[in-house]
Image: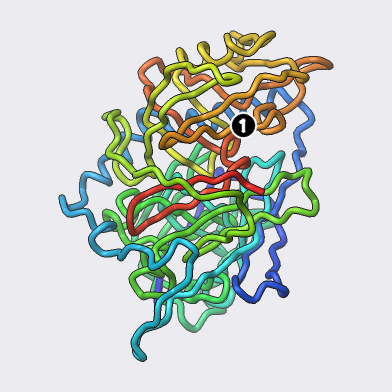
């Protein structure tokens, strides 16, 4: 398969080097590693403020309006649901296919985190060149850096050199995208993309700094008004069943390797059953179609219901949980000893708190562990909360990132448009 990707000339996105390696002992899955990045910022407050600002920038009104204009340019037909079949089996076992059709496989990528689990990376091969890319359900573009990129953000990163590839075809269409941590722009090209042991040929991609693999729906792709994403291409060419899933490790768990599974789930990574919640059309007019948006049924503190029900964007590319200002106040008032730093817009919680924050999806409560709720120490007794208030009172949805996702096994059912969670082992 040929995939289209993007070439970036300039960028303010900072990405650090990682090492990714396959799992030689797992015959069932082809595994891509998640790589952990060490936090190099000694100023905890600056680090936490940057996390909050990144989430605010990513879901700012102007950026959502831009994405909405892209999504609205799509036809009224739902391409994702109509063009992708339902998974054969939630475990990833594929059914027999005809001799001239590839048999869908389950492909596992080991993934690691960086900077206090700030983001997670896996390895892909573009043409014949390796890149480590953020796995991001909050965007749809695939991009890597171009050899001509001279901005500071491209230093010490792998860069795509078209002259070293015999399969690359320049497309040359300009593109740009905004993330929480910066923006990127460049030109598109067409190349073979390998992820695990699966190769997609002719994929559109963007070219930038050691890159991002967008896992949201086609509608959010900034290319060609919803050009197929890498996942869509793999599904349509019957390389994988239409589902992918994550097990996220913690930067302190040196023996636990995070995994990204294409085409199924890994039952060894979770407890009990996966409960799925359907993707919905956002009630908030500020959220365009194309995100993984599901209904948050409630939030609880140590079992006490807060009667909060919101649209929730499930975003593996965001470190924290970002909520409306009033919801943040309601939550932290129920946590003994918590305080709002009004100057910096973040909450601090006693580091020895025993309060349990839980989120309810499809009738199931999922607890957030204390180690995931607390980002970093603010001083000897107080720690920064991983639940951040939005700065805009008009924001009426939740952005659910790694503060929650590290504690669950998450599955994204593209064919049936559902998101599932189970307790992570």
The residue positioned 61% from the left and 29% from the top of the image is 50
Q: Say how the picture is coloured.
A: rainbow
SS label for mark 1: strand
- Residue 258 rendering spot, x and y as whole percentages: 66, 54
In the image, farthest residue toward the bottom: 99
Q: Residue 292 lies in what quarter of the image?
A: top left
The residue positioned 52% from the left and 39% from the top of the image is 182
- Residue 299 rendering spot, x and y as whole percentages: 49, 24
Tell me if residue 13 comes above or below residue 356 in the rendering. below
In the image, farthest residue toward the right: 380
Tell me if residue 181 comes above or below residue 326 in the rendering. below
Location of mark 1 (residue): 368
Q: How many marks do you count on the picture?
A: 1
Q: Is residue 228 visible?
A: yes
Q: Residue 378 lies in what quarter of the image?
A: top right
The residue positioned 70% from the left and 67% from the top of the image is 21
Mark 1 is surrounded, within 10 Å at the Cα level, by few (under 14), some (14 to 19) or many (20 or more) other residues, namely many
The residue positioned 33% from the left and 62% from the top of the image is 86
């Amino acid at each position: 398969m040929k995939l289209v990707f993007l070439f970036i000339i300039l960028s303010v996105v900072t990405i650090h080097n990682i090492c990714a390696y396959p799992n030689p002992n797992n015959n069932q899955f082809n595994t891509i590693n998640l790589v952990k990045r060490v936090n190099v910022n000694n100023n905890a407050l600056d680090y936490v403020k940057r996390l909050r600002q990144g989430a605010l920038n990513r879901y700012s009104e102007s950026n959502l309006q831009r994405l909405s204009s892209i999504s609205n340019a799509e036809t009224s037909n739902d391409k994702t649901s109509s063009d992708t079949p339902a998974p054969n089996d939630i475990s990833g076992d594929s059914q027999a296919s005809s001799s001239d059709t590839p048999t869908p496989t389950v492909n596992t990528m080991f993934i690691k985190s960086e900077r206090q689990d700030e983001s997670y990376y896996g390895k892909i091969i573009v043409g014949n060149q390796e890149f480590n890319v953020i796995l991001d359900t909050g965007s749809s573009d695939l991009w890597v850096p171009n050899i001509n990129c001279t901005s500071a953000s491209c230093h010490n990163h792998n860069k795509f050199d078209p002259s070293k590839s015999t399969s690359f075809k320049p497309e040359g269409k300009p593109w740009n995208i905004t993330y929480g941590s910066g923006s990127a722009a460049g030109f598109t090209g067409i190349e073979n993309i390998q992820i695990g042991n699966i190769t997609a040929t002719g994929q559109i991609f963007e070219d930038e700094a050691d890159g991002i693999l967008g896992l949201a729906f086609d509608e959010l792709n900034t290319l060609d008004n919803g050009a197929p994403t890498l996942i869509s291409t793999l599904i349509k060419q019957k390389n994988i069943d239409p589902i992918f899933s994550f097990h996220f490790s913690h930067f302190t768990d040196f023996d636990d390797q995070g995994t990204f599974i294409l085409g199924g789930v890994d039952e060894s990574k979770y407890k009990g059953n996966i409960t799925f919640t359907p993707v919905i059309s956002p009630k908030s007019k500020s959220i365009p179609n194309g995100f993984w948006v599901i209904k948050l049924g409630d939030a609880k503190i140590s079992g006490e219901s807060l009667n909060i029900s919101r649209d929730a964007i499930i975003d593996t590319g965001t470190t924290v949980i970002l909520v409306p200002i009033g919801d943040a106040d309601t939550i932290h008032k129920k946590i003994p000893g918590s305080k709002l730093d009004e100057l910096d817009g973040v909450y601090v919680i006693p580091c020895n708190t025993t309060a349990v924050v839980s989120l309810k999806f499809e009738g199931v409560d999922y607890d957030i562990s204390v180690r995931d709720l607390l980002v970093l120490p603010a001083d000897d007794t107080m720690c920064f909360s991983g639940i951040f208030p939005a700065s805009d009172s008009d924001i009426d949805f939740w952005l659910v990132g790694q503060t929650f996702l590290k504690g669950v096994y998450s599955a994204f059912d593209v064919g049936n448009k559902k998101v599932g969670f189970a307790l992570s082992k």
